[in-house]
Image: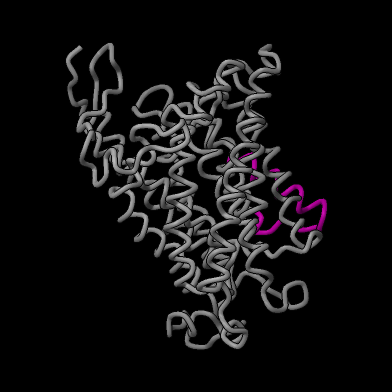
């Protein structure tokens, strides 16, 4: 059929892109409340800095590296559609039978917001102690070398897609970014936390969140924005989007209950930080699975993610790495849980639904490839920046407050640690 612009789909995708863009300011509030009062502005600036930087580089070479002509199934040619020129097709055909299409520029906006939030997620792992300038250089380089290739591999017919080499076993499933976003960012957070090192006083001094209402407000905005993330990935206001919306809600709600129950059993109290963190854990886990599960199996997935992520956030104290705001425990673990459990719970091909082991094997493979790829890229970039620009602010600046040393500002009239 002759392509035509479907205004309903176009409107839905514009709204979805706007919702996902809201997630980064929401993350800034979520992370900002979790830091100490002397670091809140720096944490929020790391998120807003990523928004500004990736917002510029995505139309220059990000879209082309993600969706341009493939180089070995790993990355798109950055010059193929550089600056949204070259072979850039202004019309994206979504349904070849009916010809329903939308402007490709709308998809550029939608995909740019995914790149922005992914790099912003990493910032939480290294809060309180790094130079803003080094972070900004890392954000641009990591997005270029890790995120864009991963997006190409999973969503643009590359090695980890349903057209890739593993599809001969079973078609990989990553509905909205379990590998591309959460495993990718979670591994990067772990590697950077190890390279940068611990905050002064980690494990000795109290480093509690300074503003829990801010954390809960941020979690609420993340949940709201996530509907654009997951339901928007259906690329239409249809039954798949509806399923993704309901699955997103039920998984997040179940994860809150799982997290709070785990806290109650371990510590005797259910906390507001646990509720907010449980929301995010459930949202992370359902991201790759939102279109593949039922609402009932989404409850199972969310509950499992809530329990496992609640247990995982304590690993940093046992293993001795300083993941400041639990990026590893929530995003890496939650991303792995969601990606792997698709192999058990998917309505089509899941082990518990008579599908055998094929899908489970493929989901484990793509998760492992994502871990290795992101880990290697982050390690090289992190060490290169450590030996050139340096990551850490001076110790006296860290103690006094990174807001003052990096931005000459303070969030509150009196600075408390």
Query: In the rendered image, which quarter contains the C terminus?
Result: bottom right
In the image, 43: left or right of 265? left
Residue 325, percent from left and from top: 62, 62
Name the residue: 35% across, 46% down: 62
Seen in the picture, residue 2 relative to 401 is either above or below; the reply is above
Residue 265, percent from left and from top: 82, 51
In the image, 63: left or right of 147? left
Seen in the picture, residue 61 relative to 209 is either above or below; the reply is above
Tell me the chief SS of the magenta region: helix
260 and 229: which one is in front?
229
Name the residue: 75% across, 47% down: 261
- What range is drawn magenta here? 252-274
Residue 78 included in the magenta stretch of the image? no
- Total tally of numbered discs in the picture: 0
In the image, 99: left or right of 253? left
145 and 135: which one is in front?
145
Residue 207, percent from left and from top: 68, 73
Please, which colouring scheme is shown? one colour
Query: In the rendered image, which quarter contains the N terminus?
Result: top left
Name the residue: 20% across, 41% down: 85
Residue 255 included in the magenta stretch of the image? yes
Location of residue 79 by image quarter: top left
Seen in the picture, residue 36 relative to 308 is either above or below; the reply is below
């Amino acid at each position: 059929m002759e392509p035509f612009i479907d205004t309903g789909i176009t409107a839905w995708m514009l709204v979805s892109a706007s919702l996902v863009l809201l997630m980064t300011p929401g993350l800034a509030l979520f992370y900002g409340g979790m830091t100490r009062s002397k670091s809140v502005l720096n944490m929020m600036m790391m998120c807003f800095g990523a928004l500004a930087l990736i917002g510029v580089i995505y139309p220059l070479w990000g879209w082309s590296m993600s969706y341009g002509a493939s180089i070995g199934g790993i990355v798109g040619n950055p010059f193929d559609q550089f600056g949204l020129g070259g072979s850039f097709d202004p019309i994206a055909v979504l349904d070849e039978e009916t010809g329903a299409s939308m402007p490709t520029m709308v998809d550029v906006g939608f995909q740019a917001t995914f790149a922005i939030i992914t790099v912003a997620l990493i910032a939480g792992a290294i809060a309180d102690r790094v130079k803003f300038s080094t972070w900004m250089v890392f954000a641009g380089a990591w997005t270029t070398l890790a995120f864009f290739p991963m997006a190409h591999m999973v969503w643009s017919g590359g090695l980890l897609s349903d057209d890739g080499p593993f599809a001969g076993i079973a078609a990989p499933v990553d509905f909205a970014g379990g590998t591309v976003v959460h495993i990718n960012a979670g591994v990067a957070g772990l590697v950077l936390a190890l390279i940068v090192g611990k905050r002064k006083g980690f494990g000795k001094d109290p480093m509690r969140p300074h503003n829990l209402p801010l954390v809960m407000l941020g979690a609420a905005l993340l949940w709201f924005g996530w509907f654009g993330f997951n339901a928007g990935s259906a690329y239409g206001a249809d039954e798949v989007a509806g399923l993704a919306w309901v699955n997103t809600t039920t998984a997040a709600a179940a994860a809150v209950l799982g997290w709070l129950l785990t806290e109650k059993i371990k510590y005797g109290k259910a906390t507001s930080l646990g509720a907010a963190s449980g929301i995010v854990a459930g949202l992370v886990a359902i991201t790759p699975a939102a279109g593949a599960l039922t609402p009932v199996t989404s409850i199972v997935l969310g509950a499992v993610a809530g329990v496992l992520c609640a247990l995982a956030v304590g690993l940093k104290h046992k293993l001795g790495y300083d993941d400041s705001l639990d990026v590893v425990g929530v995003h890496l673990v939650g991303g792995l849980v969601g990606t792997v459990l698709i192999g058990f719970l998917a309505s089509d091909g899941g082990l518990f639904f008579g599908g055998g082991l094929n899908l489970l094997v493929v989901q484990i493979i793509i998760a492992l490839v994502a871990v290795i790829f992101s880990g290697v890229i982050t390690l090289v970039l992190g060490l290169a920046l450590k030996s050139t620009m340096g990551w850490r602010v001076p110790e006296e600046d860290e103690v006094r407050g990174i807001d003052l040393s990096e931005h000459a500002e303070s969030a509150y009239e009196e600075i408390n640690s």
